[in-house]
Image: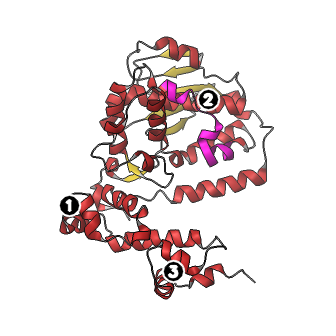
Amino acid sequence: MHRRSAGGDRLAIANVPTNMLSGLLLLGAELGVDSDSWLAGLHLSQDQLNDPRTRISYRQAYEVIRRALPMLPIDAAGLAMGGAQNGGNFGLLGLAMKTARTFGQAVRIGLDYQRNLGPLMDLVLDDSDADTLAVVATAPEQAQDLLPFLCEEMFSSILMLGRELAGDGFSPVRLELAYPAPPSIAAYQALFRCELRFGQARNAMLVERHWMQLPFASYNPVTSQQALSLCRAQLATLASRGETTAVVERLLRAQLRDNPQMSGLAQALHLSERSLRRQLAEEETSFSEIHDRLRTELALELLQEPELSIAAIGNQLGFNDAREFRRAFKRWTGHTPSDIRRPPG
């Protein structure tokens, strides 16, 4: 079911992981730039952007980038970010790609699960040419002013991952970019080591087809399937949600032990309870629904820790009485906490 809050506007749906913005904050810190103003008024904190559970909207991500770029004392900030990437930055997806059978299979895995990393452009593979394959990147019309940065970060990240998978000899045949040549064109040439074409009809990285047949010495069918299973689970968490829902989730997650009330969250958001209730209703959810879902998720996680008592787990969820927690958990899941803990067999 689609959230009505988005009004059909994909940019307002908060289902984007924060990998990109977390990297941007790191770059700002390395350059000695105060990034506090980048997040002002967006109901986001640096700690939240570094939390892998946080989801933001494209609108929020683009706004942070628009604020950040004028403050960074370097050209081609996207190349600086993407060019510093390694396999570890790609997490489970990087592992799934590295343990694939061939480079071509790794590419397909990367495209299938690209959303797991929170990219701000969409990638598709164009195989219409007999000699080359093209990874084509597109951004929404509303983000065209950010196109140089988005393309720099995207294609340099792909390049560095490609070199980690296939060796330093990996380079594209050509890079096609829809914007005019930037002053930092020498940095592009040094990194990509290929023909550069600016002012083109699309944004694409073209590679020779023979790379797709390259076998990986790191191929491991068991590890690959395990990593792919986890990638699928990650992708399933990226359900569409509105910006208000995502903000309430972030605030609630940090306060579950204190049993937060809707009135307190409304005050923190400078809204009346009525306005907050209406905004959540427009996103087809409610405060209690979000609260119960987050408490259920945390309870299921904590129940995997055998040293924690049922009472201690309930306390972390805001319950002072273990019996009250048991009743609530049964209502949420249909099972008791002990049922979840009881070993099979």
Foreground residue among 37 and 242: 37
Q: Is residue 92 magenta?
A: yes
- Residue 91 sits above or below residue 204 on the image: below
Secondary structure mostly taken by the magenta-highlighted segment of the chain = helix
Whichever of labels 3 and 2 marks the residue nearer the N terminus, that label is 2
Which residue type does callout 1 highlight?
Leu
- Numbered disc 1: secondary structure: loop
Residue drawn at x 40%, y 70% is 258
**Residue 245 magenta-highlighted:** no
Is residue 142 depicted above or below 177 in this figure? below
Mark 1, residue position? 271
Residue reaching furthest to the right: 217
Q: Residues within 10 Å of mark 1 (few under 14, many from 20)?
A: some
* Residue at x 30%, y 55% (from the top left corner): 6
Q: Disc 3 residue type? A: Thr
Give the distance between the C-alpha atoms of the residues marked 3 and 2, in whole angstroms. Answer: 44 Å
Q: Residues within 10 Å of mark 2 (few under 14, many from 20)?
A: many
> Does residue 280 appear in this view?
no
Mark 2 or mark 1: whose residue is earlier in sequence:
2
Instruction: Give the magenta part as a residue range.
Output: 79-97
The mark nearer the N terminus, 1 or 3, is 1
Residue under numbered circle 2:
160
